[in-house]
Amino acid sequence: MKPVRFAYHQPTSVGEAIALLGSFGGTARVLAGGQSLIPQLNRRAVRPEAVVDIGRLPGLRHFGGEGEGLRIGALATHHDLETADRLPPGFAVVPETARLIGHPPVRSRGTLVGSLAHADPRAEWCLLAVLLDAVVTVRGAYGARSLPVQDLFAGGGRTVLAHDELLTAVFLPRPEPGAALSETAFQEGGLPLVAAGAAVRLGPDGIAVSVRAALAGTADRPVRLPALERALCGTRPDGGWQDRVGDAVAELPEPPSDELADSSYRRRAAQAMLLRAFERSVSRARDAVPAS
C-alpha cells in the first residue's frame, strides 16, 4: 500500500516549520526521522494533507549536559545516543535504552524526541522520560514553553500539543545511580509488549533512600507507580520487595488485550519485568554506594 497524496514541505527554520503547521490547521504531520510516521503513511493509518520535514533544521541535532541533567535536541538520533562517549556521569541508562530500540537502520534515523511526539504507550524512550520526570520544550507561534513529560501524553498515541506546536528538545534530570529498564517483546527489535523501569538509590546502610518505578504497555500511556515507590522507600531490598511489587501490579487497572497478548499475560509480564528492573537497579545502586 502507498500513502495518499500529500504536500511536502522542508522548512529551513523552526519558525518556518511552526508557520507551516499552523497554515494547515491540524491536517499536517511532522517528519523527523520518519521511523514511526512513514510506516503509518504507507498503511494509510494517517492521511495528512501535508508533511513538514524538519530533518534538516539547524541546531536541533545536539545533546549535552545542562545543570544536573542532559538536554537532547529534536534531531538527535537513537544511534547518536547509543554511541555517545561524552554523556554526563550517571547517564549510562541512556545508551542502554537506545540499544533496545529497533535495529541499526532504525536507530540511525529515528529520534528520541520523535518517539515522545509519537507517544506510543509501549515505547522505551517514553517510559524512561516518565521514570526520570523529564521536561520537554515546546515551540509555537507564541514562543517556547516547558512541559512535564507526563503532561505531554494524552493516551493512545496522542499528545496535548496544538497543531501548530513543535517539540524541539527534552531535558532528562540526572538519574539515580541504579536506573535500569527491562522489557519483553514479541520479536527482537520490535516494540515491547511490556517494559519496566526502576531507579533506586541506597544509603550506606543499604536502606533505599529514593525509589522510582514505571511501566509501559499496561495502559494507554507509561505510568509511574507512586504507591509502590512510597512503600519501598525507607526499606531494605529483600524478599519483601517481591511481594510488594506483586501487590502493586495486581492493583493496576486491567491492561489492554490485543492479537499479541491478552490482559492477564501483560499483567504477569509487568510483574516479571518490574522485578527484573528492580534487581538490576538495586545491584547498580549497591555498586554506587561509597565505601564507609
Image (cartoon, grey):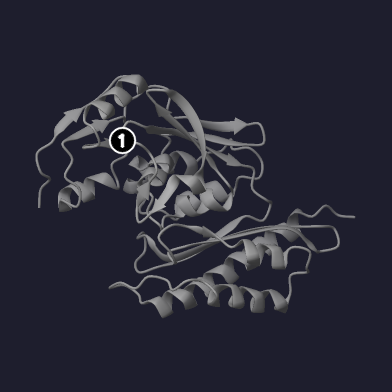
Residue at 21%, 34% in the rendered image? 51
Between 18 and 57, the one lying in front of the other is 18
Q: Which residue is mark 1?
A: 163
Horizontal side, residue 43 vs residue 274: left or right: left
Between 138 and 283, the one lying in front of the other is 138
Residue 281 location in percent, x, y?
65, 61
What's the amino acid at mark 1?
His
Horizontal side, residue 208 vs residue 222: left or right: right
Between 31 and 21, the one lying in front of the other is 21
Q: Is residue 21 above or below residue 134?
A: above
Quarter of the image where the C terminus is located: bottom right
Secondary element type, mark 1: loop
Residue at 23%, 32% in the rendered image? 25
In the picture, residue 167 is in which quadrant?
top left
In the picture, residue 166 is in which quadrant?
top left
Q: Is residue 220 above or below residue 90?
A: below
Horizontal side, residue 83 vs residue 180: left or right: left
In the picture, residue 23 is in which quadrant?
top left
